[in-house]
Image (cartoon, helix red, strand yellow):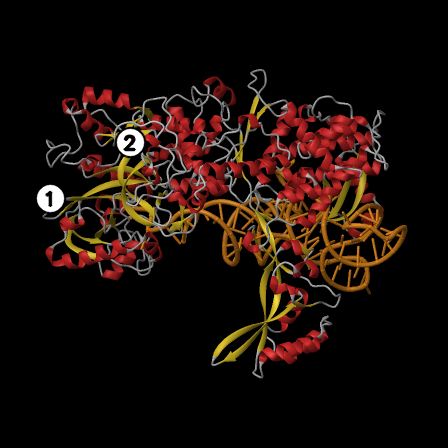
Amino acid sequence: MEYDFSAIEKKWQKKWKEAQTYRVEEDPSKEKYYVLDMFPYPSGAGLHVGHPLGYIASDIFARYKTHLGFNVLHPMGYDSFGLPAEQYAIQTGQHPAITTENNIQRYREQLDQIGFSFDWSREVRTSDPAYYKWTQWIFAQIFDSWYNLETNKAEPISSLIEKLESNGTYNVEAACEDHWWKALKAEDFPHFGEHFEGELTASDWNSFTPKQQELVLMHFRLAYLADSWVNWCPELGTVLANDEIKDGVSERGGHPVERKLMRQWSMRISAYADRLIQDLDGIDWSESIKEIQRNWIGKSTGARVIFQVQDADASIEVFTTRPDTIFGATFMVLAPEHELVEQITTAEYKEDIDAYVHNASLKTERDRQSDVKNISGAFTGAYAIHPFNGKQIPIWIGEYVLASYGTGAVMAVPAGDQRDFDFANHFGIPIINVFEGADLSEAATTDKNHPLQNSEFLNGKSGQEAINDAILAMEQAGFGQGKTNFRLRDAVFSRQRYWGEPFPIYYEDGQARLVPEGSLVSLPEVDKYLPTADGEPPLARAKKEDWPVFFGEQMEHNTMPGWAGSSWYFLRYMDPNNDECFADRSKIDYWKQVDLYIGGAEHATGHLLYARFWTKFLYDRGYLPFHEPFAKMINQGMILGRSSLVYRLQVKTQEKGLNKDASSGFYLSNDLREVLEKESKEWGVAELISALEKHEAQINLEALKDRLEKLEDGGDARVWFSRQHVLIDHVDNDLLNLESIRSWQPEFATAQFILNGKGEFTCAYEIDKMSKRWYNVVNPDDLCEHYGADTLRLYEMFLGPLEQSKPWDTKGINGVHNFLRKFWRLFHSQENTFIVSDETPSKDELKVLHKTIKKVSDDLNRGSWNTVVSAMMIATNELTDLKCNKREVLEGLCVLLSPYAPHMAEELWNKLGHETSVSKAAWPTFDPSILVEDEFEYPVSFNGKMRFKLSFPATMSPKEIEAAVLANEQSEKYLEGKTPKKVIVVPKRIVNVVL
RNA sequence: GCGGAUGUGGUGAAAUUGGUAGACACGCUAGACUUAGGAUCUAGUGCUUCACGGCGUGUGGGUUCGAGUCCCUCCAUCCGCACCA
């Protein structure tokens, strides 16, 4: 065999492993480069060809950067806590750690086969206690911090305590709930009166018991326990974060989710909302991911306005982005859950309101979302007072106002908001037109820049000016102020699961406390991985002696969510075995941010947001010299499967008025089906038979007719064609393998195939997600075996731009495999002897090399992995034509190829006489002087249409070229005797004659 | 509804700053050599026309000597968010 990829790849994979070729150490003499992949969850299904796509791209880039002389960190690990291993444990009793270990082994085998340059000595696993010890440590730091709005960063809780001790809350500007003190229980603070507004003096604070102090501090910690409305998924038995829910059901499994008030750990990510938006400007991510994050964080600026309730000791606070339209407020709407609803509702309307509130409480989030078109609401009987003009404003409740956003209440301005407009019209509430000359017969006027009217001091103003003036007036009068709101909610951090990081938390006297620093809380053994009978999380099953460490009355029973471990793993790679800290500062200072991060776009609102949050936190607390984790990110597209479909003849009969389908056992070649369906979707038996005859279908028509007539059973039946997925292994080039398909599923064993005129059976195809369900999964192991890892690597890149989703089609892989063989033949004779010569290459041969060096380097720099493969193919084709076997050229080419096909490059490099690995070879230097041409072939166009080409010396001036073109005999025909209006000569590009 | 992205042969795609549209592959057609493994080589292959030529980058318009590329309009597909006040 000429190019024995199988032997070569095995040989070098073994040597690389033995020589630790891809191990890296910190080296201050070299510039660093950090290339990171999103580490995988090791699922039981193993890898399909879509998974390695990003890894191959990053591996190529890492190898390229190494050739350029960078010290490249390119690690890999596993996000190994997760639900599937736990569910498997529930079903089988097998400890999730064992399942996980097995899956990791399988992943590792598959990855090793592809020839990645990962430094496996740096592997991390989030489920490894030596790793999650530091996840717990980071949690402890977050718990031990508050967010100081004055300095705009997280600070140790001790600095807050100092402030409280010396000055109470008077100098404290902290990120916290708007009315945090309302959650304090009267029984814990018996001396507080009803009018306690959250202001504490130093002596208040200092008189508190430690428990009372702790209860207050909990409202300021960045990781805090609170009763909060969470997304509870009964099916999974756990709470879920907002980003784990899609379309109102759980992302995993698609189970229903309900709102539930539970005491849970939360992360005060909302404190970072503004910075998380601002800092997006400084990182090189795709615009779409940035937009998704901006959207998710949802910043809106406006004002907070307080409306007094008439005849009641209550006020309603609203948030509005359009304070300028306040004179158009003709009613208010509270969320049904709003705390004031009960208090302000008058006796007359109590029944209505109670019914409405009750009704709303029964609905799930999903019901509410799907019900948005219905306008509903109820009047409370109460009125608010317009703060500027004292007018009465009716207070309603309505589901369109969300309790969880803003203040849970709105001032409704029907003239300026479509929902308010619809609500007003539906309930016959008056509308004040506050916009000059606006037509409000059909819809509200939402244009910010429309001048105002009926608005006293705002009349004639518009836009930001009006908004600013309105806010200024409110602030002066003392009932409102400018305010920024975010859609981003704090992240629920507790999960009621076993297979996750335990918290470094225990309870004593009802208080959550951190375990002493340095004590690792590893997962205790439990008898079952299910919740307890009374609904406690699985960890509640562990008895005191089951815990590796135990403090206080009880350990925390929740575990951390999946995103905890993945929020900082890129830091651990820098120093994976450190037992003293999460990573040594000198190593962090060397490797710094991830320079290139490659992974899927599906983590836009989860992992990527949380990792940014934790990075900013660690930066604030002085543990990191940077505040964004991933400087540049590329999101690879999904590789889709190409499913094959066959069509079966179905017979539809009428029986007792019901349609009944019967399968005939006959399958129809797709090309025939297309022809037939163009004429009609359904066929009578006789017409079908004659049509098949006409189109030269190969089948025993008599037998088919018999069969169909039997099914028809004398009635007037119609024949139609149903689709069915078939395993792609039985299909080659859309032709069904009639022998092998019979052994696939029983129904095919006896099937009859109606072949086309050529005696073939063609399949239709369709592009689906790659999934067992569609029988379209292609796995990399088979391809490595058939074509080799180098071919797989090249082909995955050759498919198209990395960012784009594209269908996998194994057919094309021959193309790149042939290219590699052709490349091999540049170095070898027909008898496969190595024939590289030391002769000096010709100018043409050097041109090919240098053209390719430039193209490959440029393309890699701009992230165009696919076109590099083309460039290498072109070079190989050209050198084959030139019969070039010169060392100088081939050696350069060998290095160019090595990031893509490291095994072959290594083998050839070795044969070229090198002792060291090709992966350490210097990237060839591009010499522009070699590409200087004496002549340029100009495309000559007339009125923009290219007609012919003419070569001119590179030194010729545009004037001379113009003259030469017009004098050329080929021009006569197109000039048609006219004098050109203008001749445009762009040196080394084009000549255009304008007539 | 809002936001983001994408529309180029039979297929995957290329064309980086406006300058020969379809590189490189797959597939297909014909031929050669052979017939055992899925091979290799040669030629052709956007559409249309006998041909000269004409038409071609989702649609319609614009700017320009020249537009896949820039501007406007509309359409389609995908993704994200969605009574967010």
Q: Nearer the viewer, mark 1 or mark 2?
A: 2
Q: Can residue A983 be seen here?
A: no
Q: Which mark is residue A628?
A: none
- Looking at the image, which is closer to me, A482 or A440? A482
Q: In which image quadrant can residue A217 be found?
A: top left
**In-front residue for pair A827/B13:** A827
Residue, disc 1: A313
Mark 1 crowdedness (10 Å alpha carbons): few <14, some 14-19, many ≥20: few
Q: Quadrant of the N terminus of chain A?
A: top right
Secondary structure under the numbered disc 1 in the rendered image? loop
Q: Position of residue A335 (x, y in %)?
A: 24, 50
Within-10-Å neighbours for mark 2: few <14, some 14–19, many 20+: many
Q: In the rendered view, does A878 fall on the left or right side of A346?
A: right
Q: Nearer the viewer, residue A394 or A505?
A: A505
| Residue to which mark 2 is pinned | A175
Q: Position of residue A438 (x, y in %)?
A: 31, 55
- Is disc 2 placed on a helix, strand or loop? loop
Q: Position of residue A926 (x, y in %)?
A: 71, 26
- Which amino acid lies under the numbered mark 2 shown in the image of this protein? Ala
Q: Position of residue A293 (x, y in %)?
A: 42, 40
